[in-house]
Image: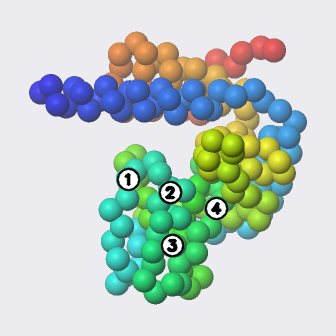
């Protein structure tokens, strides 16, 4: 019983840290970038590795590291890392996967979405950089990208504040994050 409780508490902390990353200030740059990205072609990415490929024992929520590792260690030499956007209803999540023979594969296990495939937008403006401390980060047009971009920043921030309140109240983490888009009260500027 204690192990399950500990697992839920670790998950609560993970969800709280993730929620905090989406609370950055809205900007004109973000709005313009979202508009540009949504005009790019949408492709389908398949979860898992292609039949016959080596199975990667990859950690969840580490897509950039997993995709880079897979591409670098692919014994066939055909895999390349592709970074773009995982299109979700209210956000564009910065996401990396691999392309093999023209097909996109997400090699990162994801614990909350059982779908076989998902919409992905590759973005030629994304660039990987390294800061003074040696930390890799992604940027677009000179702007450092965190977890992604918001389609409606004030609404995402309101919904995220609701999720944070629910997590901090002790609610089951899986239930706390089940918030319909638009459930959070938008804060007036």
Q: Residue 65's spot in the image, x, y percent?
A: 50, 57
Query: Along the horizontal axis of the image, is 65 left or right of 129?
Result: left
Q: Earlier in the sequence, mark 4 or mark 1?
A: 1
Q: Residue 111's spot in the image, x, y percent?
A: 37, 48
Bin the neighbour count of mark 2 within 10 Å (Cα to Cα): few under 14, some 14-19, many 20 and up: some
Distance (Cα) linking label 4 and label 2: 11 Å
- Provide the residue designation for mark 4: 83
- Provide the residue designation for mark 2: 65
Marks 3 & 4, CB-CB < 8 Å contact? no
Query: Along the horizontal axis of the image, is 90 left or right of 118?
Result: right
Q: Is residue 132 above or below residue 154?
A: below
Q: Earlier in the sequence, mark 3 or mark 1?
A: 1
- Provide the residue designation for mark 3: 72
Q: Residue 104's spot in the image, x, y percent?
A: 55, 72
- Provide the residue designation for mark 1: 59
Q: Earlier in the sequence, mark 3 or mark 4?
A: 3
Marks 3 & 1, CB-CB < 8 Å contact? no
């Amino acid at each position: 019983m204690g192990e399950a409780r500990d697992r839920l508490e670790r998950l609560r902390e993970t969800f709280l840290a993730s929620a905090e990353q989406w609370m950055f200030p809205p900007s004109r740059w973000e709005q313009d970038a979202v508009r540009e990205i949504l005009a790019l072609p949408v492709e389908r990415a398949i979860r898992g590795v292609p039949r016959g490929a080596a199975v990667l024992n990859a950690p969840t929520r580490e897509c950039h590291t997993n995709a880079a590792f897979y591409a670098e260690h692919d014994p066939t030499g055909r895999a390349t890392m592709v970074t773009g956007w995982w299109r979700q209803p209210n956000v564009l999540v910065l996401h990396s996967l691999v392309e093999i023979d023209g097909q996109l594969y997400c090699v990162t296990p994801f614990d909350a979405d059982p779908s076989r495939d998902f919409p992905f937008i590759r973005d030629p403006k994304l660039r990987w950089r390294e800061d003074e401390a040696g930390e890799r980060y992604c940027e677009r047009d000179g702007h450092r990208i965190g977890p992604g971009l918001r389609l409606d920043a004030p609404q995402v921030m309101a919904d995220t504040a609701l999720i944070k309140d629910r997590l901090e109240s002790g609610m089951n983490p899986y239930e706390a994050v089940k918030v319909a888009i638009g459930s959070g009260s938008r804060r007036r500027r």
